[in-house]
Amino acid sequence: MTVLADLPTYDEALAVYEPVIGLETHVELGTESKMFCGCPTAFGAEPNTQVCPVCLGLPGALPVVNEAAIRYTVMIGLALNCTIVPWSRFARKNYFYPDMPKDFQISQYDEPLCVNGWLDVDVDGQTHRVGITRVHMEEDTGKSLHVGGSTGRIQGATHSLVDYNRAGIPLVEIVTEPDVRSPEVARAYVEELRELCRALGISDVRMEQGSLRCDANVSLRRRPATPDGPENPFGTRTETKNLNSLRSVERAVRYEISRQASRLSAGERIVQETRHFDEGAGVTSAGRSKEEATDYRYFPEPDLAPVALSREFVEAVRATLPESPAQRRTRLTGDYGYTLTDIANLRGAGVLDLVEQTVTAGATPEAARKWWLNELARRASDAEIPPSQLAVTPADVARVATLIAAGELTDALARKVIDGVLAGEGGPDAVIEARGLKVVSDTGALDAAADAAIAGAPAIAEKVRGGKVAAVGPLVGAVMKAMKGQADAGAVRALLLEKLGVS
Amino acid sequence: MAITRDEVANLARLARMALSGDELDHLAPQLDVILGSVARVAEVAAADIPPTSHAVPLTNVFRSDLIRPCLSQADALAGAPATEDGRFRVPRILDPED
């Protein structure tokens, strides 16, 4: 693989050329059983233990469509504002490759189940509408292990080992229009699609396990000669396959833009080809050229009856659609006063659901956000578990937040309460009781401690009396120490200033 | 509608059939005759008869999303010419020069 030394900077490329990007995303559906047979779909089983005559393509085996896979695909189609067609067929895609034991893949060709939709994507406060060309169903392929080459690559391998556990898992392919114009929007689209599929509950959408993967079609065209001049026709595109992280989507598209700009600026042509992205080097390289002239000889799958969904079926599915991520953002910015960045951060930390449950349990949105995003996300990260598996419930957090708001706990005490809950000492009230963690609001004890602090540091007390209010810090510290931290620092400070006559 | 020798050669390549030049000379005209015979169906199909892909007028044949017993690994691999580590062992996929 050659790394191009003469790549123009990305900004130089963008000044001359407009990127035109289309995305094809594959989502493995989270059905219990496979698309056309009853084998389980669980990830990580011993090789070739979740296979049967149907998904091994043994003679005489007949496929039957999984009804849940149809329903999930319709859910995706409706959530992407697509038309669900009244007549749809499966097709055989013929090719020889050991990842499909039948020597064909059952897919859909010119009659996909869902067509003509869109998904809105927000990037830096701007909304980009990405057209959805089609959503179709197919079956996943087996997994190959290449042996004998360097680092498991197919190039130079002496032979390959195939596990068909994944073969036949229902897969949905979502194809966009060439509407995307930047790597950032490409990444945001895949992220929004991932969140949408997660909200629909139709896939675990784990890119690192391959249950959501993306191919990026990228081409460049010269920008119009004048700002309001006519747009130039699309250029030749390349397809970079199997991007398996959001970051890879953005990096691969960005690299292709620079690479193509460099070729075009040198007067060369872009070859329409499949490319692979090398995560380590951050570059794309040409795939196999020999197989390029693909002729899949699609024809209607004779073993499967056409799918002709009734309006009633589609409307019944529509009635089950949950709130979309976009609707949720609108609700949370409105009802909770969160910014889009807040929501992105909470989602990134894996605590958005927990925060909502905490607010439902009585905390303010701000307190719920603060506790989960800071303290609790950190505890989960320290323990190397997802926040949802922490031994503290949203109701516990809401109780702690309520006690803080009522002045019965300080933040420092609240953290000790959380310690206790996480250590399995019971709910917040039990921990407070057992550890004696309540803020001391006994004015007698506070008074005495404040008087003692003033008497113990006459020089400081004099400074404060003379108007240097900022000097009161050490006195506050002394009182907090005397109270073993179980006092509200703000209240202590006010009490001291009052006693020193400067409040 | 006629099928040319080149088209038959291409189809043979796609189907991984190693046909010699003599075999192509022999088979291509035969395929052409077969296609011509089948094409006569179109002559009797009136405009109001849509093309069909299935012999039976069925739609929406679905199964419930239920797990059924699988083959054991040993049974799954029993017919394989070669196996390794519980997997089907297949020859090199890419030629060395690829």
Image (cartoon, coloured by chain):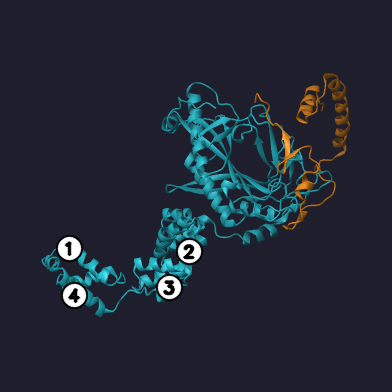
In this view of the protein, which residue sits in the foreground, A324 or A430?
A430
Find disc 4 in the rendering and name its residue. Answer: A451
- Mark identifier at residue A431: 3
In this view of the protein, which residue sits in the foreground, B54 or A38?
A38
Disc 1 and disc 2 on one polypeptide chain: yes
How many angstroms separate mark 1 from mark 3 (CA)?
A: 36 Å
Disc 4 and disc 3 on one polypeptide chain: yes
**In the image, is residue A320 above or below residue A139?**
below
Q: Is residue A32 left or right of residue A444?
A: right
Q: Nearer the viewer, mark 1 or mark 4?
A: 4
Find disc 1 in the rendering and name its residue. Answer: A471
Say what amino acid the circle numbered 1 marks: Ala
* Label pair 4/3, CB-CB below 8 angstroms: no
Q: Quadrant of residue A334?
A: bottom left
Say what amino acid the circle numbered 4 marks: Asp
Disc 1 and disc 4 on one polypeptide chain: yes
Q: Report in which chain the residue with disc 1 lies.
A: A
Q: Nearer the viewer, mark 2 or mark 4?
A: 4
How many angstroms separate mark 1 from mark 2 (CA)?
A: 42 Å
The x and y percentages for residue A238 are 57, 32
Disc 1 and disc 3 on one polypeptide chain: yes
Mark 4 closeness class: few <14, some 14–19, many ≥20 residues within 10 Å: some
Q: Is residue A444 left or right of residue A390?
A: left
1 or 3: tag closer to the N-terminus: 3
SS of the residue under disc 4: helix
Q: Give the letter of the cyan chain.
A: A
How many angstroms separate mark 1 from mark 4 (CA)?
A: 16 Å
**In the image, is residue A144 above or below residue A355?**
above
Disc 2 and disc 3 on one polypeptide chain: yes
How many angstroms separate mark 2 from mark 4 (CA)?
A: 45 Å
Q: Report in which chain the residue with disc 4 lies.
A: A
